[in-house]
Image: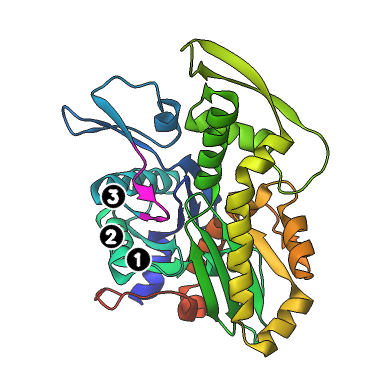
Amino acid sequence: MFKNLFKFTANSIGIDLGTANTLVYLKGHGIVINEPSVVVVNQKTGRIVAVGAEAKQMLGRTPAHLKTIRPLVDGVISDYEVTEEMLTYLINKANRMDKKLFRPKVVVGIPTGVTNVEARAVYDAARAAGARQCYLIEEPVAGALGVRLPIKDAVGTIVVDIGGGTTDIAVIASGGVVRSKNLRIAGDKLNADVLQFIRDEFKLIIGEKTAEAVKIAVGSAVVGNYMETIVRGRDILTGLPREVIVTDADIREAMTNSVSKIIDAISEVLETTPPEILADVLEQGIVLVGGGALIVGLDQLIRTTFKVPVYLAEDPLTAVARGTGIAVEDIDFYKELLIVPEYDRSI
């Protein structure tokens, strides 16, 4: 009786807690929040000044007493208190869109291979932020759910989730992860590669936001159509503003080492995959999700390297968030895919 009552008097929320962006799915409404995982803290008072998009706008533009914090590093919590504050802000914002009597039920995506301590930190932060119940789900599994792959069937599928802090590669079959690898090379590392390359080759200092914009504008994994963009920054020698023209070839060179490591990680997973599942992969292919999957030509490079079909998910940025939403809408059906903490006595 009470279980059915909660369905109507409490929200169900799915959260893709990402290093770069956090997305929130609200049952009955879809994805309602997509904000950067950035928080600005006043160091004099210890109070949160801004969260999400507003905080990201302040990157590199704050006085000394305001500190810009990214509370998640490589997909895991690096600052528990700030993460709790950020989750509180996001959960409350979602709840205001559809007010209910009780606290919400929440499913949160986490990278594969995290330690029990790291998983516990996510769980505790969500509970402290207002979740009545909290379940965890591995991000590649959520991504597979988000693109409606038949992951509960006895058919092998490989999902490559290239996020902001981590690349998660998982072989999924019969409702579980058969093989997986977590690589701490993803969107943020590619941004850093671009930033360092422009500093070394053009003697120009740029910020993180500019590096990301350049990667999005002309980044590619294979030779294709010529692309160029103007990059503005500070000249290392003179200290004065200067602009240069950067091409797709420049950014491809900047990212080549990191992209090669992602390819090597996929190869490692394939090499340890059972033959029966590998046969399924040859037929079903590899599915790419996450923002990093949008790099031009990356799917083509993986297809050429491994000689298997490769598919870019529809709207790969939101695939994991959609998957957490699907899971939270039917906890009983997807329970075997979820990580139910033993220390949670309320579930």
Q: State the residue position of label 3.
A: 84
Q: Position of residue 196 (x, y in %)?
A: 52, 35
Say whether residue 237 is left or right of residue 60. right
Q: Is residue 326 visible?
A: no
Amino acid type, callout 2: Arg
Magenta highlight range: 69-76
**Considering only vertical position in the picture, is 201 above or below 268?**
above
Q: Residues within 10 Å of mark 3 (few under 14, many from 20)?
A: many
The structure residue drawn at horizontal position 67% and vertical position 85%, both measured from the top left corner, is: 277
The structure residue drawn at horizontal position 59% and vertical position 77%, both measured from the top left corner, is: 172
Q: Nearer the viewer, residue 306 or 132?
A: 306
Q: Residue furthest bottom?
A: 276
Q: Nearer the viewer, mark 3 or mark 2?
A: 3
Nearer the N terminus, badge 3 or badge 2? 3
Q: State the residue position of label 1.
A: 134
Q: Residues within 10 Å of mark 1 (few under 14, many from 20)?
A: many
Q: Which mark is residue 127?
A: 2
The structure residue drawn at horizontal position 66% and vertical position 64%, both measured from the top left corner, is: 147
Say whether residue 98 is left or right of residue 66. right
Q: Secondary structure at mark 3?
A: helix
Q: Quadrant of residue 116?
A: bottom left
